[in-house]
Amino acid sequence: MPDESTARRDANDRRAALAGDADAWADWVGRTYAPVEAFVRWRCGGVKDLADDCLQETWLTAARTVRQFDPARGEFAGWVCGVARNVVRNQLRARRRHGARHRPLPEHAACPHRHDGTAVAEALAALPERHEAVLRAKYLDGRTVREIAADWGETEKAVESLLTRARDAFRAAYERSDHADR
């Protein structure tokens, strides 16, 4: 749940944007763009063209569906990240379908240790939300186990255990992806 002042601000921004106030929409997007962009780039495994496509589609979808956003249920940035999560999954599915028909030569044949960003994105998309969230908090946001535990109301031991399970799940999802076939 967002704090009262954030919920009130998001409600006012939503109302103004729905009334057609382009400046209010631009300010609202401007305040939330950076965390949404970081989230999308994280979920796309550093694949620039995938992240750019997903970011654009995320904001277009958010603009079309902003009526569905409820400030009482969460912050706008979190809602847009939820939109992005679905956009990334859909983009990855579409790329897999396209890739099954058109297999390019492997870019990393000369450098077998290069990580495959698409495989990273697919592995992140396959994780349960809680596993992805703890990996994001630790590796994208740079938070310590102690900070995560305090924010989530859990013990440090519980967060360490969750991180271990999340890393194992990520590794398994990455190894299951078709990156080895490229």
Image (tube, grey):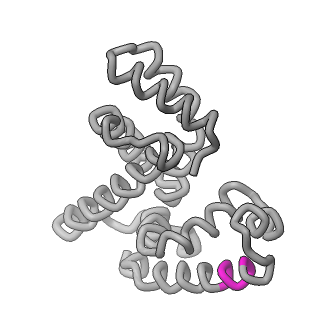
Front position in the image: 59 or 150: 150
Q: Is residue 48 visible?
A: no
Residue at image location 76% in from the left, 69% down from the top: 149
Q: Nearer the viewer, residue 57 or 101?
A: 57
**Where 126 falls versus 49 (above or below)?**
below
Q: Quadrant of the C terminus?
A: bottom left
The chief SS type of the magenta part is helix
Q: Which residues are magenta?
A: 159-164
Between 17 and 181, the one nearer to me in the picture: 17
Residue 123 left/right relative to 159: left
Was residue 133 drawn as part of the magenta stretch in this picture?
Answer: no
Q: Which residue is rendered at x = 47% and y = 54% of the image?
A: 47
- Is residue 163 located in the magenta-colored stretch of the structure? yes
Q: Residue 29's spot in the image, x, y percent?
A: 49, 29
* The quadrant where residue 14 appears: top left
Q: Nearer the viewer, residue 101 or 45?
A: 45
Say which residue appears at 41% left-offset and 19% top-offset: 16
Q: Quadrant of residue 101 in the image?
A: bottom left
Is residue 144 visible to us here? yes
Please state the horizontal and vertical placement of residue 138, each as a whole percent of the image: 71, 65
Please tell me whether residue 180 is drawn above or below residue 25 in the rendered image.
Answer: below
Question: Residue 172 appears at what percent x and percent y?
Answer: 50, 86
